[in-house]
Image: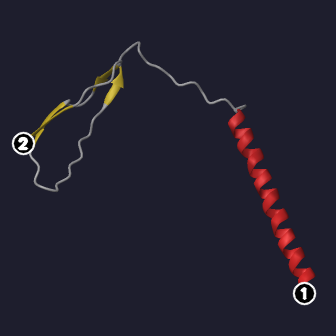
Amino acid sequence: MYSLLIQVPAGRSATTDTRWGLALAAGAQIDIDFGSRAEAGRVTTRAAPSDDDPGKALSGILGLVMLALAGAGLYWIVRTRVRAS
């Protein structure tokens, strides 16, 4: 027999049971649904991601550089094979 106790994070209250007693056979799996909600007056929101994130611009530039290098490498390979024949 196993006992399961779910601890609710600070600022939230459980909407389902937080204590469970269960017996499992060897190798058995079980899913336990758990729900919680923000307590009144304690709702926190995440800041919206900024559109002018420098990481996005940097990754876009890096992608273009890699594409240009791949094109230049392909051009070099084709050019050296044409000269060799």
Amino acid residing under circle 1: Ser
Quadrant occupied by the C terminus: bottom right
Q: Position of residue 25 (x, y in %)?
A: 10, 53
Residue at screen point 11% across, 49% down = 24
Task: Give the residue pinned by disc 2.
Answer: 1
Q: Tag 1 or tag 2, which sits nearer the N-term?
A: 2
* Picture layout, residue 4 above or below residue 31: above
Amino acid residing under circle 2: Met
Furthest toward the front, the residue is 84
* Picture layout, residue 80 above or below residue 70: below
Dot 1, crowdedness within 10 Å: few (<14), some or many (≥20)?
few
Name the secondary structure under disc 2.
Answer: loop
Dot 2, crowdedness within 10 Å: few (<14), some or many (≥20)?
few
Furthest toward the bottom, the residue is 85
Quarter of the image for residue 19 reads top left
Q: Position of residue 46 (x, y in %)?
A: 53, 25
Left or right, 45 with respect to 11, comes to: right
Left or right, 83 with respect to 47, comes to: right
Name the secondary structure under disc 1.
Answer: loop
Task: Give the residue pinned by disc 1.
Answer: 85
